[in-house]
Image (cartoon, helix red, strand yellow):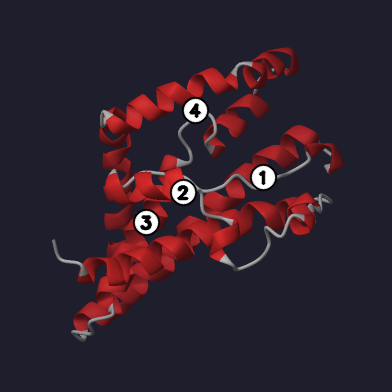
Amino acid sequence: MDFSVYLWSIPALIIAIVGHEIGHGYVSYLLGDDTAKRDGRLSLNPLGHIDPIGLLFMIVFRFGWAKAVPINPSYYKHRKRGTILVSLAGVAVNFIFALIAAFFLVWTTQRGYVISNFFYHFLWYNVMLGVFNLVPLPPLDGSKVLASLLPSHIEFKFYKYERYFYGILFIGVITGIIPRIIGPAIYGIINAFVNLGASILL
């Protein structure tokens, strides 16, 4: 095993996780909810954002999750709309990071800089987190978007029984079913971002 890989991948993963979670908390704060701020979740300290099991899954299976940011949708002027915006904020941050990473990956690779290894992992983890979190299974962000689009009485039942979907997500990850489904989207987005970066630089 080439342990030097972890010198690049672990910092890249941590930054991607922290950016994702702060994105949730900050947008919720802008919408009037200071729950995440009071809980210290707008901090850059990675210890406040990392879920040990989710991190282990990211390292072993290359798919995982972070500690959920506490939010209180009752503060939002429009609860459903606010929930959707907050849920998608983390994904948006990851895709923005990925675009930046793709640009610097192309730039540093052209010049033979060793730090291109960091940007490769930073690009991959950000796209993975962005796409994976769009899966509509609890506790992922996609499930909250889906629930918010449902009629209120169905939304209530969805949240009431959401814990039963956790097992489906777990099995889907460890069996490779979910990675196989979303894998083409991940690598399609990565290729598109890299091609965009190359078209700008070349």
Residue 127 versus residue 195 in the image, above or below: above
Which tag, 3 or 4, sits closer to the chain's start? 3
Which tag, 1 or 4, sits closer to the chain's start? 1
Tell me the residue at 63%/18% (across/down). Answer: 158
Give the Cα distance between marks 1 and 4: 17 Å
Graded by Cα atoms within 10 Å as few (under 14), some (14 to 19) or many (20 or more), the crowding at tag 4 reads many
The answer to whether mark 3 and mark 2 are in CB contact below 8 A is no
* Residue 98 in sight here: yes
Graded by Cα atoms within 10 Å as few (under 14), some (14 to 19) or many (20 or more), the crowding at tag 3 reads many
Which tag, 1 or 3, sits closer to the chain's start? 1
Which tag, 1 or 2, sits closer to the chain's start? 2
Q: Nearer the viewer, mark 1 or mark 2?
A: 2
Give the Cα distance between marks 1 and 2: 26 Å
Q: Nearer the viewer, mark 1 or mark 4?
A: 4
Q: Residue type at mark 2? A: Pro
Which tag, 3 or 2, sits closer to the chain's start? 2
Residue at image mark 1: 85
Residue at image mark 2: 52
Q: Residue type at mark 3? A: Tyr
- Name the spot of residue 128 as percent of width and height, x first: 37, 49
Residue at image mark 3: 125
